[in-house]
Amino acid sequence: MMLRLYRGLTTTIGPALPVYLAGRKRRGKEDPLRMPERMGRYSHPRPQGKLIWIHGASVGEALSALPLIEKLSARHTVLMTTGTVTSARMMADRLPANAIHQFVPVDRAPWVRRFLDHWKPDLALWLESELWPNLISETANRNIPMALINGRVSDRSFANWRRFSNLARHLLGAFDLCLGQTDEDSQRLHALGARRVATPGNLKFSAPQLPVDSDELRLLESTHLHRPSWIAASTHAGEELMAGRVHLALKSRHASLLTLIAPRHPDRADDVAQDLREMGLVVARRSKQDEITPETDIHLADTMGEMGLFYRLTHIAFMGKSILSSGGQNPIEPAKLGVAVLMGPKMDNFRDVAYRLLVAGAAREVADEQGLIREVSHLLDHEIERRGLADAALSFAGNEAGVLNRILAALAPLLERMNARA
């Protein structure tokens, strides 16, 4: 019933979707040159042979899939779809030779069918929690084997899906296999209707260290590494001001302190920079190539794809969206680079990883802004303790690196079934 209603709604609003996409294009949320892909049209011919389609919503899912893509593309063509401009740019630089990126079609049935008619995937792998009803139903109707990889069901999502239990059962029941990040995720997937469930672990642990331009790193090390510093990473609205206040509170004790702030959405950088300057802070913007001088308070890391650079320029990282709002950001990325990790209490999207980091002594939790001030100051004053925390984070991340092999083992029957098909 709910699926029919959804299909009816997407059919009714179908004529308005090009207008919606045009509005997104004006706001920089769509690639003007690749808009047809969002309507199911293709930008590449389909290669001969077996094709594995992997879909993830955005940057985080796409990056976590890279090790899996590298393994699978050794034998087959891989089609990677995402829905954001930033993820498309990153995939252009990082996908292996036998992999293609396309934007996922908007979930309107004719566009979905057009996409599937062209690409004819032999296996479909979905990442985390990106469940589009038309896309899933049309794929299942073509008897294409499907698996959910790194499945995640947050408290809010679980409550929402339970309200539409019939739809959840229909969608999740279409998957041949659902692999949860945690036991709790797997239990929730099963409760919502998944037929076959397993828990190989979190694929994000298998992601390689974030890349870095070594020339840019050498260029900036001279202005960063001789100063005490910390980074507020992947911040959301309000957190940049909080980081500015933390800097002002710490500056009297750590006179040459340099604070890095990396907004999750760099398109907010103009407003962020203005707000910080109104606080009396001297701001240098990475996107403008502003010089870092001894007077610089804030290095605003307002570019995409350079978190590997920024994490390497400091020794302490606070994960955004974990105090003022909930969700959190990926703490595995700084952990893999041996950075001491701090996080707020609202790491909902990384609850299991955050808990295990804390238990392993590989991260510390701060309750609020004052707690963040105290912890950053303490770690700046105690280098041996800071290094111990960073080493524990690096060790923890390394110990979880076997997840990829477990996921590949779980997928082996589906891959064999795919290869056996004519």
Image: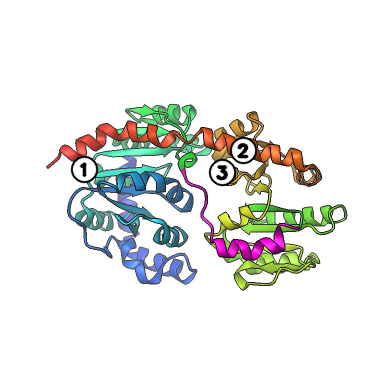
Q: Nearer the viewer, residue 292 or 243?
A: 292
First reached walking from the N terminus: tag 1 or tag 2: 1
Amino acid found under the numbered disc labelled 3: Lys
Q: Nearer the viewer, residue 74 or 115?
A: 74
Question: Which quadrant of the structure image shows residue 335?
Answer: top right
Q: Nearer the viewer, residue 291 or 178?
A: 291
Query: Which residue position holds label 2?
Result: 393
First reached walking from the N terminus: tag 3 or tag 1: 1
Q: Is residue 319 visible?
A: yes
Real-space CA distance between mark 2 and mark 3, rounded to the nearest whole angstrom? 7 Å
| Residue 390 position in % (x across, y down) | 66, 41
**For residue 144, side relative to residue 324 (left or right):** left
Real-space CA distance between mark 1 and mark 2, rounded to the nearest whole angstrom? 45 Å
Residue beneath the point at 32% across and 28% down: 195
Residue range highlighted in magenta? 207-226
What is the crowding at mark 1: few (fewer than 14 residues within 10 Å), some, or many (at least 20)? Answer: few
Q: Tell me, yes or no, whether the highlighted magenta stretch contains residue 286.
A: no
What is the crowding at mark 2: few (fewer than 14 residues within 10 Å), some, or many (at least 20)? Answer: many
First reached walking from the N terminus: tag 2 or tag 3: 3
Q: Tell me, yes or no, whether the highlighted magenta stretch contains residue 217.
A: yes
| Foreground disc of the pair 1, 2 | 2
**The N terminus - image quarter:** top left
Residue beneath the point at 47% across and 38% down: 160
| Residue 76 position in % (x across, y down) | 25, 48
What is the crowding at mark 3: few (fewer than 14 residues within 10 Å), some, or many (at least 20)? Answer: many
Amino acid found under the numbered disc labelled 1: Asn
Query: Which residue position holds label 1?
Result: 141
Kind of element beneath mark 2: helix
Real-space CA distance between mark 3 and mark 1, rounded to the nearest whole angstrom? 41 Å
Kind of element beneath mark 1: helix
Q: Are marks 1 and 2 in contact (CB under 8 Å)?
A: no
